[in-house]
Amino acid sequence: MARRDSVIDEEKRSYGALWLVLSLLLFVAGLWAIADDYIFRRPWKYYQERFSQMEIAKVKEAIAAEQARLDQDPEYQKAVKALEEATAQVQSGETGEQIAQLEKQLERARLEDVEKDLNLRFVKSELEELRFLYDDAMHHGREDEAQEVLEKIRAKEQLQVERQAIYSESQERIAKLEAEIKAKQAAVKAAQDALAKLTATRDDLQQKLETISLGRYPAPSASPPFIKVDWVPKIPKIQQVVLEEYDRNSYQQPVARVDRCMSCHTGIDKKGFEDAPQPYRTHPKREQILGPHPVDKIGCTPCHNGDGPNVNSARGAHANYYDEHGQLHEVHLREELALFRGPMMQANCLKCHPTAVGLEGGEIAARGETLFIELGCHGCHLAEGYETLAKQNDVSIIGPSLRRIGAKVEPGWLVRWIRNPHQFRPRTRMPNFMFDETQATQIAAFLLAATKDSSAAWVSEHPAPDVPRDPQTVAAGKALVDSIGCRACHALAPDEVAGQIGANKDIAPNLSAVAEKTDARWLYHWVKNPRGFSDIARMPSLRLTDDEARAVTAYLLTLGAPQPAPPPLLTKLRDPGAVAAGEKLVRKYGCAGCHDIPGMELESRIGAELSTYGNKTKEELFFGDRIDLHEDWATFTFHKLKEPRGYATKWIEQVMPQFNLADEDIEALMVFLRGRTEAKIKEDYRYSHSFSEAVVRGQRLVARYNCTGCHIIEGRGGDIRRLYEKNPSEAPPNLLGEGQKVQAPWLYAFLQAPTTIRPWLSVRMPTFGLSDEETVTLVHYFQGLDGVTSPFTYIEVSDYVGANVEAGRMLASADYLSCFSCHVRGNTFPEGEKDSWAPDLAMAAKRLRPAWIVDWLHDPQKLLPGTKMPSFYADPDNPDGPPDILGGDDDAQIRALRDYVISIGLAQAGQLPTQMTRVQNDQAAVQ
Amino acid sequence: MKRIMVGVALVAGLLAGTVHPAPAYEAIEVTNGGSLTGTVKYAGTPPAPEKFAVTKDTQACGTEKTKPDLVVGSDGGLANVVVIVKAMKGKKLEVPATPVSFDQKGCEYSPHVLAVPAGTTIEVLNPDGVLHNVHVMGKVNPEANRAMPKFQKKIQWKVEKPEMPIAVKCDAHPWMHAYWFVMDQPYYAVTDAAGKFTIADIPPGDYEVDVWHEQLGQKTEKVTIPAGGAATVAWSLGKS
């Protein structure tokens, strides 16, 4: 009984309050879920709507401005008035009545036309039916019936012709009425067209307004007075770009990358939002960067990083954020996705481009790359893509060869140099290993011992020259050094800067104290033929005569004073114990990474591999005792490059030397290093061009031999021009368009053995002693820069005789263009001083590409701004040439000049047909 | 923190690098304007005129010439000095309706210093019958180098944008050089052979005046222009 009672009690109990509470909870949770889904976790919706409003407001503003302009424009007012008048005319008065009449007639005619059309169609249908009946009768052999039907068909056909005529007449009438009305309204139409022409801009904007919005809502007629009628923003939706097979998953399978950045950054590829706040702002380098990298194909994260698909919050999508103190924080566990801010994003250029050098917008990465190569980082650190640059034929080529160091440097200087190279040359590339006096002496002792025999052999083969030290010889030497091009690479005063890598590294040694380092014998033989001392010398030969070499040596010996090593030091340098200790040090500090040292050819790189350094997480980086630093990649790398041994602890030694890099160079190197990652981007996404490889190889050679010390190449360099500011035409040539300009075989031969092209220059093109491979690389490089696909130029000798050449000869004469007023022609030289001369035209046949000559003659300034060569045919609209040759046709004259210029060289080489065949050819042409 | 500093430096750099367009010259009605008249002299003893031998096109150019870059008159007056009153408003800059001549007769540019309003058409003459080339090394205006062969007796050249100065030279005759001043306002003059110049119709007030010579450099003078009167000055330029 009791049990039953308790059940009844249970049933009687009310759960109303609980139910109420729970359903309220459920209701609130539901609301919250909806709000969360639609509002809180969808910040992009707000951004898109906001952007849409901005865009609408902008276009509306533009329309208003345009309308205001129109209102001020008397033309527009006239057109509006004309339209009004024309409209009034057709709506009232006699014309108005006539039109009304015509329109009434037209209406009636159209009504009647419907009936006439119907009648015709009926006949056609009936005819179809009869034809069927006829066929049917014939098929079943009911010939009589068929005959009967046939007659009916004939009658119907007749009827069809009649009704067709009625219908056609009706159509014509309608057309005629329409034409009449149109003619009466022609004035209106014309006025409308005239107005439309004036309002085209406004109407286009109006149309744009409709495409960027959902339209005007609510419709003006439907709106209650309290609802504002306006253009309604589009409904926000996720904007995404899918990059198929861009990434790889953990199993190295290609997977797509999804970028939704534009869901918030709506205005990124739209002009006109340059000053809008983020995230609406237009890309700051929209045309420059988004042009070659269309957002709809490349997306955003390939350059910027970030968590592409994440649209829940800015912090999540960017995977990093600035706190209120301006400190950048990464989002935990997503460090590898963190957005690159500032120049760091240039690191990503290198994922798809074979080099950053020459990339517009990739200047900092390019600077880092150049520093990495030219400072020889790859001598100690393996880095994919740069593995082969440190050695040539198994010889380290980053620093000078030490194979004959004993014959080159004064031992006391060598010790001082090893101790701290920056003390002797603050801007040298050689880093400071911070050796103490003993260590430096030991290393010097080893180097001198190891190269003793080879040095002695060289000395015995190269006698000390008799260098006169009188002021005249010194002055002559200085004049040579000043004029033949030495200063393109070398500075002669402590504070002078010639060419440099980055902010503070000289490309070539500063010679202000060279006499402290070496002696007359070495200087004389070195300046005469650097490759005679070292096979890997970067320094070229300037083809000095013995006298010139003596003079240059005499001058260089005035720069600085020898400080001979004291005898006790010489004794120490001969100590076998020191030699052995020195060898250990040389191995430990990896000197052979950069220098060719006898017996150390097989030493391997001593530094950590950097191929994937950009991927390293902070856990993989050793901060040592530096608890003062914020632990992240950028901080670690900056301080590593700033103080290479800063992370050493009592127990862990570090050997990286001090490069004394400027902060901006460190930043550039950081950008380059950030780009060293595991990412393997699919071929389709990479920059590739048939010339890419040739250009990259060429750029590296150009850097190695410092061609840009003299020449401007790819718009960079020309360091020597600092000496020719007043007379730039005396500076070495700008090589803009060299690939288009010269024939490949000529360039090859010229690079191997330069000849004089510009007799007025005192600066000399050096002989670099390039290998065949290097020379070919350079030829391909110049052709690649200019997109020249064929290395061949065919000149059909028989094309260069005849009337055309004669016309060219006439044009070139003193009576016309007077080419030889400046140009050398074989052994015939122009009047005047050499500074008014121009290149030998007899070279053109072998040197220049005929197509280039035509472009050049059209407008030399366009191909090479600033050139001495004036434009004879620069006016595109009017003929510039003399009217009495070839009918005054500029193009024909230019072709004639080209042919004549080429014929000069052919004739000089005895390649032209004889006079006899020339006449025959002419006759053949006439016939 | 470093990054912020870099950022701040960058922003500062950007701001500093922003080009504020120079306030444009404003044309107004000038009533009771004053004039500036005076002489520019060579400070110190003028060097003897420098002569050099000519070895090219001697039938047209002669065999000897005097360097045109420092011409001092008998009483020390310095020719070819450009005097520019830096006025912000004043009379309208009138562009000459007919082209202004720039002659190359005898392989010498005449005038050696030419000052014209922006928009002027310069007519370059070649009466010599030899190949000249006119290399106008504009930095604001486009650089151009046009040949004038024997048969081309004149060419016209429109200088559109203000630029002070543009160097002009002939690459065929390296001694030939000249300067063009393309002005954005009307208050300028080039001194004559006696070093004299006059600039009229200047709204009264205090002005800075730039005095430029190709060899002796540029100097800024101060001057007060009286209403309806004339300010007379005697300036000198010398090797510093």
Image: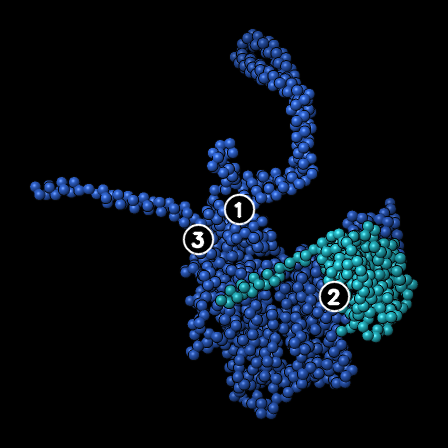
Chain colours: A blue, B cyan
Is there any visible trace of residue A745 in the rendered image? no
Q: Which residue matches tag 2?
A: B222
Q: Which residue is drawn at 61% across and 75% down?
A: A427
One can see residue B228 in this view: yes
Q: Helix or strand or loop: what does disc 2 sit on?
A: strand
Using the rendered image, report if marks 1 and 3 lie on a common chain. Answer: yes
Image side of residue A501 versus residue A837, left or right: left
- Classify mark 3: helix, strand or loop: loop
Crowding at mark 3 (Cα within 10 Å: few <14, some 14-19, many 20+): some
Residue hosting label 3? A313
Q: Which of the two residues, B121 or A255, is positioned nearer the viewer here?
A: B121
Q: What residue type is labelled 3?
A: Ser
Residue that mark 1 sits on: A54
Residue at point 36%, 46% (across, down): A33
Indicate the position of residue A167 as horizontal and vertical percent values.
62, 16
Discs 3 and 2 share one subunit:
no
Residue type indicated by callout 1: Met
Q: Quadrant of residue A118?
A: top right
